[in-house]
Image: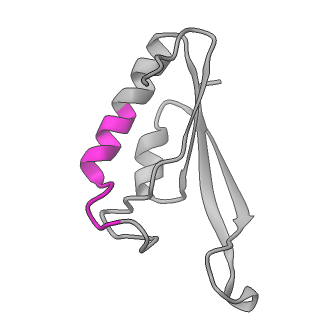
Amino acid sequence: MYARAVSGDLVYLDPPFAIRNRRIFYQYRYDDFGLADLARLRRMMRRLDDNGVAFIVSYAASEEADELSTGWRRIEVSRPGNIAGFKANRRLAREVIITNA
């Protein structure tokens, strides 16, 4: 079933990270989300905003996030990474929160 966002809704978007098409998490296929998808995401953000729909996008701090966030409110955060198998190997991950709210 497909639901359409309407004015007053809030949409949270958490896409895989393209990072110039370099895979960050190897559980995704290399071609699951790339630079062309970032352009589609940017168009979706514009469409949501034009329709009065609030959005929040989380993305890895990167050049792509810089491009994606142009014209929107941007907050950079650090969070503990939980990807490494051993706690000693886990590092802080830098992410960007992009929103029109």
Q: Nearer the viewer, residue 25 or 43?
A: 25
4 up-or-down from 35: above or below: above
Q: Measuring from the top left, give residue 44's x and y in whole percent.
A: 39, 28
Residue lying at the far front of the rendered structure: 1
Residue 32 in the magenta stretch? The answer is yes
71, above or below 4, in the image: below
Task: Examine the structure image and report whether residue 75 is included in the region drawn in magenta.
Answer: no
Residue 46 picture quarter: top left
Q: From what the image shows, is residue 16 above or below residue 13?
A: below
- Structure colour scheme: one colour
The x and y percentages for residue 53 are 55, 16
Q: How many marks?
A: 0
Left or right: residue 3 versus residue 74 is left
Counting from the top left corner in percent of width and height, residue 95 is at 61, 57
In the rendered view, tell whether residue 63 sits above or below residue 54. Answer: below
Residue at figure coordinates x 40%, y 53% from the top left:
64
- Write down the quadrant of residue 24 in the picture: bottom left
- Residue range in magenta is 29-42
At 48% from the left and 20% from the top, the residue drawn is: 3
Residue at 71 percent of width and 62 percent of height:
78
**For the N terminus, which image quadrant?**
top left
Q: Position of residue 17 (x, y in %)?
A: 44, 58
Residue placed most toward the observer, 11 or 99: 11
The quarter of the picture where the C terminus appears is top right
